[in-house]
Amino acid sequence: MARRRKRAEHDNHERWLISYADFITLLFAFFVVMYSISSVNEGKYKVFSDSLSIAFTNQPTSASQDVAVNQQEQMLKALVDRRTARLGEQQRKIQKRMKTLADGLSQVLVKPIEQGLVSVNQTPRGVVLDINANKLFRPGDAELQAGASEVLHEVALALQKEVLNVEVEGHTDDVPIRNARFPSNWELSGSRASSVVRMLVEQGVAEQRLAAVGLASTKPIVQNDTPENRARNRRVSIIIVSPAVERDAATGG
């Protein structure tokens, strides 16, 4: 059998048209995109940009950041206002409670108050009951006299109804004391405060609420320039500590 002759293959010189057409299509698409970007709405683009920023980085851009800052400021102000109102209400309740306590002590101690032996005052620290040392002790001594129990008994009855802490401070005048028992006014004032604390405990006040402090002549209420003023400075102060003071001490405020 005779072999068939192979047809001669001819080169296609028009294949470049395919690549050219693809290039023109891409170029057209490029110019369309460029035109669309050049006419984009700036406001919508800004919103879109902020949305992308928040979505991918959690960091808002300027416009949304201003809104977020304003919202945070409003929330912080609301929290501060609520806290201020709550603290103000608590403070009013504390003041009312302490005033009631001061009024109650004043009523049961009318006679020694009229005699100038006792004073009751409401201070930021709490209710302060000052008892003249001459009512409680003999000069230079820290043992309670028989007449001291009358005043301290009434005080103890009032303190039994409360749960607040009580600080008992002993105070002297500036005349130095030096004997075998009390080398200085510090020992004398501390012993007097301790004697009052023991009496209050015996009268039913919980000892966990009590503290005794000797301050010698460091906290006078008047100048130690006359015998009368020195007599006023020789005193025992019973402080019913305000809950506000206790809270500040616990928080370091």
Image (cartoon, rainbow, N blue to C red):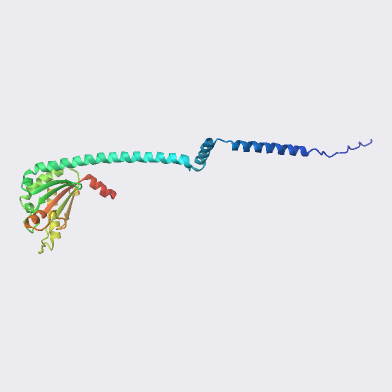
Looking at the figure, which quarter contains the N terminus? top right
Nearer to us in this view, 200 or 34: 34
Res. 103 image quadrant: top left
Residue 171: % across, % down: 13, 55
- Residue in the image at 66% along x and 36% along y: 29
One can see residue 63 in this view? yes
Res. 194 image quadrant: bottom left
- Residue in the image at 24% along x and 47% along y: 246
Residue 245: % across, % down: 23, 47
Exactly how many numbered labels are in the figure? 0
Q: Is residue 154 left or right of residue 26?
A: left
Nearer to us in this view, 204 or 109: 109
Q: Residue furthest right?
A: 2
Q: Residue furthest front?
A: 39
- Residue in the image at 54% along x and 37% along y: 42
One can see residue 161 in this view? no
- Residue in the image at 9% along x and 55% along y: 229
Residue 65: % across, % down: 45, 41
Q: Is residue 59 left or right of residue 201?
A: right
Q: Is residue 52 above or below residue 166?
A: above
Residue 60: % across, % down: 48, 41
